[in-house]
Image (cartoon, rainbow, N blue to C red):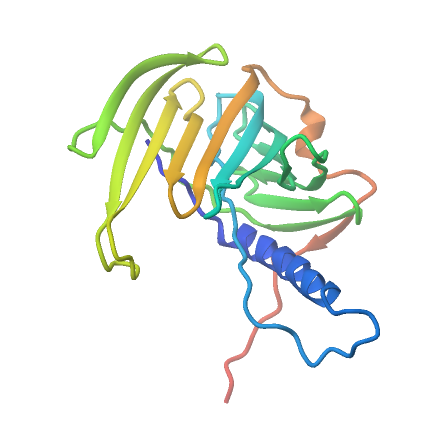
Amino acid sequence: MPPFTTNTRYARLLFAAGTSLLMSALLAQTPQGQKSTGIPDGGTREVLVSIFIPSLPGMPFTATVDTEWVRFLSDGTRTALTNHRMVARDNRGRIFQERRALVPEGVLESVVTQTEITDPVSQDEYICVPREHVCQVEVFHPVSRPSAKKADSPEEVALGTRLISGVETIGTRVNGMIPVGAIGNGSPILTKMEYWYAGRLGLNVLSIREDPRFGTQKFELSNIVMSEPDAQLFAPPPESKILDLRNPSEIRKPQ
């Protein structure tokens, strides 16, 4: 099974958003009527990387990605963040994805923060912010097609087959261990990853990652419809301003 894939651009966008939220929270902690002597040090920012959807022609579908991130704090408190976002792929291999903020389970309704359209034929990628009515277009570089991986080591366990949302999948569990001292840990850290791969879609329909450092992260596809999606999904909103970043100006080397 292909592992979770990190997209550095997404990480940068989320990093910037996290920074803004962190700074706002810190500034809000200054009592009224008292001058701030500076910004407090410290803080934590985290990025949750979702499922990877490859650009595969001839495998159209529409689905909902259900994300759940559960963590237990040192005092036993359980925290849970969720969202549900739409994804689609057409016969040409073009991909449409919503991006929604993670929100507390059962407390807030998640809103669409941006939409993304990738086209492996034209090699264009549109990133649109609905609230601002702006889309930026960049060069898209498709990633090679993933394939199911058989359990062939003591750390990998074959889980057989299973129907998920009406799609047959092949499951694999990968048991991992971070040895003592590798990241400053005083004892081994045990991790577990479970993937259920659907050959008809060329992606993982269900992924579960368990890590004591980050809690349990679960990504599952639901409402899967294996037919051609609405063509309008793969075009930027007509009222949006387009910022073309495919031909950046030449940057000269410093003398």
Compared with 221, 71 (above or below) is: below
| Residue 89 visible in image | no
* Closer-to-camera residue (203/239): 203
Compared with 199, 156 (above or below) is: below
Left or right: 60 with respect to 135?
Answer: left
What's the residue at 63%, 21% (across, down)?
Answer: 229
What's the residue at 51%, 45% (across, down)?
Answer: 48
| Residue 102 visible in image | yes
Q: Quadrant where the N terminus lies?
A: top left
Image quadrant assignment for residue 238: top right
What's the residue at 52%, 53% (across, down)?
Answer: 46
Image quadrant assignment for residue 211: top left
Question: How many numbered marks are there?
Answer: 0
Compared with 179, 38 (above or below) is: below
* Closer-to-camera residue (163/43): 43
Location of residue 204 in the rendering, given as x and y in whole percent from the top left corner: 42, 27
Location of residue 117 in the rendering, given as x and y in whole percent from the top left corner: 62, 38
Hey, which residue is sitting farthest bottom in the picture? 255
Location of residue 223 in the rendering, given as x and y in whole percent from the top left corner: 58, 17
Location of residue 82 in the rendering, given as x and y in whole percent from the top left corner: 59, 34
Image quadrant assignment for residue 105: top right
What's the residue at 55%, 50% (across, down)?
Answer: 10
